[in-house]
Image: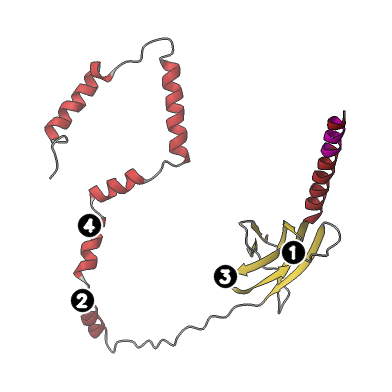
Amino acid sequence: MNKIFLFLIGFLFFGITVHAQFEKARDSVVQLYGVVMTADSLEAIPAVSITVRGTKRGTITNNDGVFSIAVLKGDIIDFSHVSYIGGSVKVPDTLRGNQYSIIKTLVRDTAYLPVAIIKPRPTPEQFARDFLNVKVSEDEIEILRKANTPEARSAYLAKLPYDGREVTNRQLDNVFQRARYQGQVPPMNIFSPAAWAEFINAWKRGDFKRKK
């Protein structure tokens, strides 16, 4: 009797503990939403990448710069864009409630390129002469030729996976063949005159010769 009583007490305590941990985890989830704008003109910035630091979760802003993502209290949210200087925002640990809204501003990033001086050729004749006398490395041409052979293209195509249309067509063809020969033995190509004709033509072409 005492063992049953102790078991019930332990089971009740375990259930209370699990429920408390679940409530704590649920309370730590926050729906973060807001808008990303330019710092100077307060215009919406679309396609801003928003990621939770240390995780693989993220989202992007829409055309109006608005975003929404589920995060945890204490998470650090990173904002990045190809044309703006990135920034970050930390969700407060002491936040009350499960929603948090922000307005994030980004400053446009300016890239300075080195100075390039462009000078034209004095005459069209000199331009044509210099253009024709430009020496191109034979190694680069040879690499391009090797990469553009039929064998190289065939090897590359053999490694490419099927796309969605090809996979669907192959699956439909298999279903059609099973339905076509349902209840009977499928024909064998060894008895097909067309298959024998193709085999003879391939033999004459030398397709089965060992390549050195």
The residue singled out by tag 3 in the image is 82
The C terminus: image quadrant: top left
**Between residues 49 and 124, which one lies in front from this camera angle?**
49
Q: Position of residue 28 (x, y in %)?
A: 79, 56
User: Is the Cβ of the residue at disc 1 closer than 8 Å to that at disc 4?
Assistant: no
Q: Secondary structure at mark 1?
A: loop
- What residue is rendered at 71% in x and 63% in y? 75
1 or 4: mark nearer the eye: 1
Q: CA distance from mark 1 to mark 4?
A: 55 Å
Image quarter for residue 131?
bottom left
User: Is the Cβ of the residue at disc 2 closer than 8 Å to that at disc 1?
Assistant: no
Q: CA distance from mark 2 to mark 3?
A: 37 Å
33 is higher (above) or lower (below) than 191: below
Q: Position of residue 76 (x, y in %)?
A: 69, 66
Which badge, 2 or 3, comes first in the chain's sequence? 3
- Give the residues in magenta: 4-11
The amino acid type found where label 2 is placed reads Lys
Disc marking residue 135: 2
